[in-house]
Amino acid sequence: QVQLVESGGGSAQPGGSLTLSCVSSGFTSSTGVMSWYRQAPGKEREWVAFISATTAGANTLYTDSVKGRFIISRDDAMNTVYLQMRNLKPEDTAVYYCRTLHGTVPIWGQGTQVTVSS
């Protein structure tokens, strides 16, 4: 069974940092594309960052609002994808989800809350 479990959320002040982790199980992580999404209260879920399979070069993409502040990375030996978040802003407050594709089926984690406030 393919499963994703996020952790690392919490509270931070504006300008602070947090690192989220997403541990996967049930599939070969090095061949899986991974993404982070977030959903703020009252808003639709939005894509945040993407990393391709290690076998495809682990290329990364980011939504414009987080470029230069967030870094997505992967450690296939640990079956983990990370989202390093720096210079956090109040508008980064959301539940953050990791996502992968199992064949054509999207698999989501349960989410982890990030709150940025002073």
Image: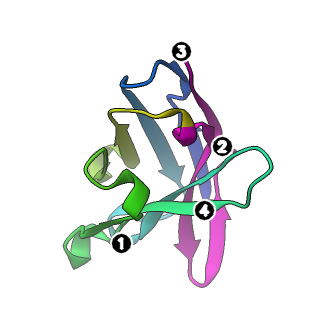
Element at badge 1? helix
Lower sequence index among marks 3 and 4 = 4
Q: Which color mode does the image show? A: rainbow
Q: Are marks 3 and 4 in contact (CB under 8 Å)?
A: no
Q: How far apart are marks 3 and 4 (CA)?
A: 24 Å
> Which is more foreground, mark 3 or mark 4?
3
Lower sequence index among marks 2 and 3 = 2
Q: Give the range drawn in magenta.
A: 91-118
Q: What x and y, as percent, mark residue 98?
A: 55, 54
Q: Mark 4 points at which residue?
A: 46
Other residues around mark 4 within 10 Å, as few (<14) / some (14–19) / many (≥20): some
Q: What x and y, as percent, mark residue 2?
A: 61, 60
- Taking the spot 32% from the left edge, 34% from the top edge, the residue there is 86
Lower sequence index among marks 1 and 2 = 1
Q: Do the residues labelled 3 and 1 touch (CB within 8 Å)?
A: no
Q: Mark 2 points at which residue?
A: 111
Amino acid type shown at disc 4: Glu
Q: Name the residue under label 3.
A: 118
Lower sequence index among marks 3 and 1 = 1
